[in-house]
Image (cartoon, rainbow, N blue to C red):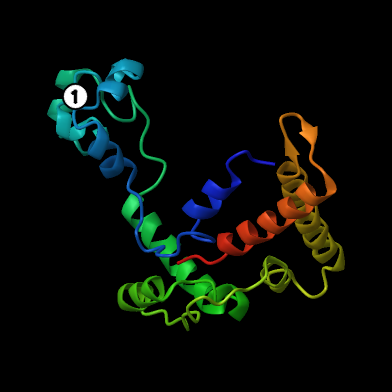
Amino acid sequence: WAVNSANWMWLSATCFFYTYHRVYSPAHFARKYDRVGKYVREWLPVLSKLPDQYVYEPWKAPINVQRACGCVIGRDYPEPICNIDAAAERNLARMDACYAAAPDDWKSLIPASAAAEIAKERDVHITARRHGAFVPLSRVAQSCVPASSDAARRAHVHQEKEMQTSATTEDGMAGGHLLSRRGRAQGRARGGRVSRVQHRLN
């Protein structure tokens, strides 16, 4: 289990965040927080002499600049593993297809504002959920598993039960000891409310 599984779901635009056309650029996103590339220059000395505009994309530097800085791409520093813009476009096309073919239960989780933005930017039309509508996690998980995969479906259901049990146990503990029966019941009620709030992705 990844400790940051929710973050992976966010970044893959499968939950919590849905406007997948907002693609993070490895260069522009880094430049936003470190314009001159101090971190890169510290840990990649081969790039330390490059001008600021090339430190995140050294392959774009003219060959005379590369030679002057002692960083010739393909000799002192590797070539890019892909064309970032082309790879982003290929991925967007695949995301378009995934969103268009997604189960209705999952689509119903997408807020109206995100659905409208996706339609505008990518021409993929999704019926937005009704305000306040709640779709149980089990229905979403099961709808994403092929009908023939009974084992996988059972695993999803078992996983959800474990998560619910864990949340109830944590709510039923305080100060290192179990609460009274009444306290545990209140904890379960709180856990149920938290679970519902989680999936009202406004």
**Residue at image point 70% right, 41% down:** 1
Instruction: Give the structural element (helix, strand or loop) at label 1.
Output: loop
User: 112 or 164: which is nearer to us?
Assistant: 164
Q: Is residue 135 visible?
A: yes
- Residue 72 place in picture, x, y as percent: 26, 25
- The location of residue 33, given as percent across then percent down, is 26, 35
Where does residue 193 sit, x and y in percent of width and height? 63, 61
Kindly indicate the quadrant of the structure image that contains residue 60.
top left
105 relative position to 34: left or right = right
Kind of residue sitting beneath label 1: Leu
Residue 57 visible in the shown view: no
Crowding around mark 1 (Cα neighbors within 10 Å: few <14, some 14 to 19, many 20+) is many
Task: Please give the residue where the numbered disc 1 appears in the rendered image.
Answer: 50
Residue sitting at 56 percent across and 49 percent down? 6
- In the displayed structure, 7 sits above or below 56; it is below
Quadrant of the snapshot with the C terminus = bottom left
Q: Looking at the picture, does residue 45 appear above or below residue 99?
A: above
Left or right, 113 with reference to 110:
left
148 left or right of 120?
right
Where is 183 relative to 59, above or below? below
Residue 135, picture quadrant: bottom right
Counting from the top left corner in percent of width and height, residue 155 is at: 82, 58
Q: Is residue 162 left or right of residue 143?
A: right
The residue positioned 75% from the left and 72% from the top of the image is 146
Q: Quadrant of residue 14?
A: bottom right
**Foreground residue among 182 and 58:** 182
| Closer to us: 195 or 31 | 195
